[in-house]
Amino acid sequence: MVGRRTIMTLGLIALFLLIVIKGTGFADVRYKVRSGDNLSKIAKKHGVTPQALRNANHLKSDTLKVRQVLVIPGHKGKIKKASKERKKLPADREIYVVKKGDTVYSVAEDAGISVKALRKMNRLSSKRLKRGQRIVVPKRETLNEVDELGDADDAASVETAANDEDKEANARALGKWKSPDERKLFVRMTRTFLGVPYRLGGTTMKGIDCSAFVKRLYEIFDIQLPRTAREQAKVGKRVAKDQLEEGDLVFFKTRSRRVTGHVGIYIGNNEFIHASGKNRGTKLDSLESDYYSKRFVRGVRVMELEPELARKL
């Protein structure tokens, strides 16, 4: 009799726990780390924040090992909702999970759209974003997909698209170099940024993105440039690739939907310095490399030498 009562009690407890767990919808999921995974990627996939992953797994750093098993905390319903949310999206859009340091401005720039378009797309009433917030952005193609576009990545085709994009752009430089030595000083200052880490939306030596790098350097010489690469491409004087001079801006198409998605500073000898998200730092590259020669859009002269000074060179 005691045995039967014990069994019945245990059964009722098990049933109660099943009902409670099912009712609350909370469930920890376990995930085995794969090659190429990182904390942000895993967090985004499961609809949680990177910090939540760190806390749940007592991680002291973001370094992960292949086959490492992580506990994915959160609400089972939330994960299902995220999956359902993705299915409802148009084919050309995706969900982006806001990370620490993100702003409406930086997310819009990375997505290749205006702040106004991003806010309208997500019905955002505020310019502030919260970490872990889920917002809709245009789907970005991988570099491999961009490479497979063929004619769409042809420099002439890109230049035509760029010209159509900004027919009302200025045709004059924004300022004058006081002397050839001042321009050389500018190039030397550009080189001091080599090795500075890349950070989307960053504006300091602790982390900077391509357009902030350009903007910050020209501010030292009293030239105010727009914040994004796309807007920077609409100012100044257009120059052909074979007429580039030290200090000119060079623009590239690095994604299929962005005509002018990346910018650097030309320093002579077919070389330029840029804050590279691809290489996670500020570095020197060649315009003659396969990657950048294919994606070059245009050169822009922000400051120019007076004709009489140029003739003395």
Image: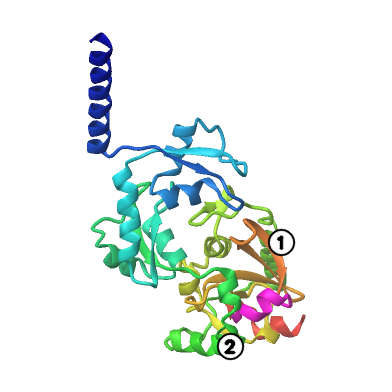
Circle 1 sits in a helix, a strand or a loop, which is it?
helix
State the residue lying farthest toward the top.
Answer: 2
- Span shown in magenta: 287-299
Say whether residue 135 is left or right of residue 53: left
Residue 156, position as x, y percentages in the image: 59, 90
Residue 25, position as x, y percentages in the image: 27, 39
Q: Determine which quarter of the picture holds residue 134.
A: bottom left
Q: Residue at x 54, y 80 (%)?
A: 173
Q: Residues within 10 Å of mark 2 (few under 14, many from 20)?
A: few
**Which one is nearer the viewer's eye here, 107 or 190?**
107
Residue type, mark 2 in image: Asp
**Which one is nearer the viewer's eye here, 242 or 80?**
80
Residue with the mark numbered 1: 188
Say whether residue 57 is left or right of residue 95: right
Q: Is residue 295 magenta?
A: yes
- Colour pattern: rainbow
* Residue 295 visible in this rendered orientation of the protein: yes
Say whether residue 54 is left or right of residue 238: left
Up-down relation of residue 175 to residue 164 (above or below): above
Residue with the mark numbered 2: 151
Circle 2 sits in a helix, a strand or a loop, which is it?
helix
**Which one is nearer the viewer's eye here, 174 or 136?**
136
- Quadrant location of the C terminus in the rendered image: bottom right
